[in-house]
Every structure is written in C-alpha cells, then in structure tokens.
Amino acid sequence: MIAAAAERVFLIRDRRYHCGMTKQFYRLTLAVLVILAAVVSPRAQSLNAGFRTFLERDIWPAARARGVPRPVFEAAFRNVSPNLKLPDLVLPGGKNTVEEINFQAEFKNGADYLSEGAVSGNAAIARKLYQQNRTLLQQIEARYGVPAPIILAIWGRESAFGRAKIPMNAFEVLGTKAYLSRRKDMFREELLAALQIVADGHLKVGEMKSSWAGALGQPQFMPSKFLARAVDFDGDGRKDIWGSVPDTLASIANYLKEAGWQTGRDWGFEAIVPPNVSCRNEGPDRGIPIESFVEAGVQRVSGRPFPDHERARQGHLMMPAGRFGPAFIATPNFYVIKEYNNSDLYALFVGHVADRIIGAGPLKTGWQRTDRLTRGDVYRMQKKLIALGHDVGGADGLAGFKTRRSIGEAEARLGLPETCWPTRALANRL
Ligand SMILES: [Ca+2]
C-alpha cells in the first residue's frame, strides 16, 4: 500500500538521526520505497485512481452546483487518498457484512458504558465548568429552553469538554466513506456538506478536523447537522464549534431544540417495573400517561412520587438491558437525546450525568452479568425473529428496543421467562 509505505518513510525520516543514516542513503531508501510502493501495490493504485475519478465525476459536479469554488474542492482533496484503516468499509469485490465483534463504545454493555468512574468523573468536571460558565449557560438555557446540565453532559461525552483530540482530516474520512463505506449515499451528502462549510467561510480546509466517523468539532456534529444546527453564539460571524465554547454549547442546545426538546420536562426516571408490566411494552411508539404506569404499579426507585408536572404526560418504558438491568420511565426528551446519537445507553449516560451534576446519586439497580453474545450472534437471532414475523428494527446485530421487545414476544410464545434481552437460551430455541 502506498499509504503504508509512506508511513514507513516518515518513520525512517524520524529515526535517521538516531540511526546515523547518511543523507544520501536516506534519499536512496526513500526512492526505493516510493518505487516499491508503486510497483508492489497496483491494487492501491487502482483504488486511488478510482477514488480520483469518483471525486471528479461524482462529487465535483454536485459540489459546483452548491456553489463550492474549484479552489476549495482542490484544496480539500490535495494529497488525500482513501484511508483503508477506517471501519465499516466495503472494498471493491468485498462483501457487505455485519462485523462479528462490537467495537464502538455505544455497543458496550451498560455496566461498562455507565461505569461509576466514567459517570462521576464527567459529573465532577461538568460541575466545575457549570460554575465557570454560569452566565453563558443561563443565556443559552433562556434562548433554547434546554437545561444546562444536559448540554454539559453531551459536551463531556462527545469530546471530554473539548479536551479530546480530534485529529483526522474530515475530507479524508468523509471522502473514503463516500467512496467505500456501506452507507455511501449518506456519506456523499456529508462530504458535500463539509465542502459547503469551507465554501461558506466558517473554517479553512486545514481546520476541518473530524473523528474517524466524520463528526466535527467539540459537539461532534456531522457536516449536514453543522449546516442545519450549529450557531454563532459569541457573535464573531463564524460558527466555530472547534475553538469557541459559547458556539459549542449553544450549538448543542440548538440541536436539541430543533430535534424537539420539550422545555420544562425531565428526560426520565429510574423505576421499579413489576412483573405484571411486560418489558414488551417498551419503546418511543408505546407511550402512555405516566400516571397509567403508576396505576399499574411502576414506582420510582427513590420511593418519591413522579413530579406533578409529569404525571399526566406521556412516558415510555425504557429497559436498556431488558430485565437484566435498571429500568426507566423515559419522557419524549430521552428520544430527543437519541436524535443526537441513536443509542439508548448514550441517551441514558447523558440524562444520568445531567442528574448527577445537580446532586443525584448513582443508579439504584445494578447491571447483571448476561450471556456475552457477539454482534454476529445477535444478528443471527434477529434474522430468525424477522423470519418469524417480528419487527426488530432492521438486522444490525444490536439489541435496540424493537429487538428487545421482539425477544420478549418470542420468549412469551416459547414459554420462556420474559427477559427482553438476547440470551443463549433463546438463541438455542429459535
Ligand atoms: Ca462564533
């Protein structure tokens, strides 16, 4: 691979002083490596050529139509080639499959994702930042109607409050994914949006740093979301979610407002769900008034009543580990947080850290040890459930709420205890 050879070249350059390598020998080595890279990897070459053709024939006309100047386009892709180390790529001739093993944080189990260390550490830093930015956060709350602790919790989760390095070239990531990923169409749109951000003057090409998934800046917005929802709160005319704390925090708040945040409502409450309330009732599409849950025997773990302003309004059963972990009555705002990052554990982390920032204690119910099924195991279970007529929300190897409640339905039909969570016992029976 040319990229790999180039990396080796850089290593040699860094080490030449230590090795006592002469300048001439270094040049010779470099030349040999470049030739080797060219000769040895015709596949990388053809991939690169295909990438260039894709950029010129597909991306450039679409970018031009959006008013992106040619120099911006050329600067964005200068020296950029496909980065084959990115996950979720489908190489030419390769198969489009689900990975067997989970690697992204949101696919972890609840005990890891909401470890007390991660939660209390985030809450402690957020409390300090809350003090330091109190006036700013009050202004943002007043304008967007989203509570400061929720904004702070998202900032912490996305970029460790702006301390995380965001090292990758957004055009390399988005270009590679638009060309080679499973979700080409989505990334093509994001690539065009990224070009537009530079064309609009918010950032220079070299400042467009992203995560490995193409998310931008401290709030980790995809480029299309940046265009739609980032705001300039400090008034300098640029939406700078890389360097400006006011822009970062207000952009997070505006994102949630645009996603439908209901001002004045909580995100949810940890609850005790008695056996007569089936875990099959979970989900954003199965809401009922919170007082109906109460009449069925659902209580808050704290023993205190649900707040008066919530009782008559819609609530949703939310059981991120089925019967094997804490349960919640979520409000619609929980699902607004999921608009930010479509994971129950993510939204729960944000909501719980927000509560901890203002003094709440740890979750009362622990996460039980469960069968460690792989993503591939869950994928195969989903395929069987689909064949039996269940709606699992698409077979992706992840136990989202539609998969969990489908599992509960299958368990009930097979006479197994309802757990609403992928188990070996069910996998063996399906
Ligand atoms: Ca600004």
Image (spheres, rainbow, N blue to C red):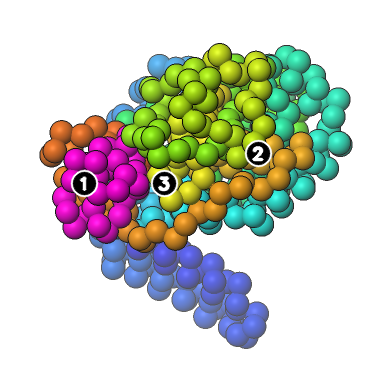
Q: Which of 103 and 186 is in front in this view?
A: 103
Relative to 367, is 157 above or below? above
Which label lies toward us, 3 or 1?
Answer: 1
Helix, strand or loop at disc 1?
loop
Q: Nearer the viewer, residue 264 or 138?
A: 264
* Residue 348: image location, x then y, percent: 55, 39
Q: Residue 375 carries which label?
A: none
First in sequence, mark 3 or 2: give its number: 2
Residues marked 3 and 1 touching at CB (< 8 Å): no
- Kind of residue sitting beneath label 3: Arg
First in sequence, mark 2 or 1: give its number: 2
- Which residue position is annotated with label 3? 323
Q: In this rendering, would 341 be left or right of 410?
A: right
Q: Give the range drawn in magenta.
A: 402-430
- Magenta region, main secondary structure: helix
CA gap, disc 3 and disc 2: 19 Å
Q: Which picture quadrant has residue 280?
A: top left
* Residue 143: image location, x then y, percent: 73, 14
* Residue 228 seen anywhere in this rendered image of the structure: no
Q: Residue 415 carries which label?
A: 1
Quick one: which residue is furthest to the bottom in this view?
A: 20
Is 188 inside the magenta-drawn segment?
no
Circle 2 packing at 10 Å, graded few (<14), some (14-19), many (20+), is few
Q: Which mark is residue 302?
A: 2
Q: Which of 111 and 309 is in front in this view?
A: 309
- Kind of residue sitting beneath label 2: Ser
The residue lying at 57 percent from left, 38 percent from top is 270
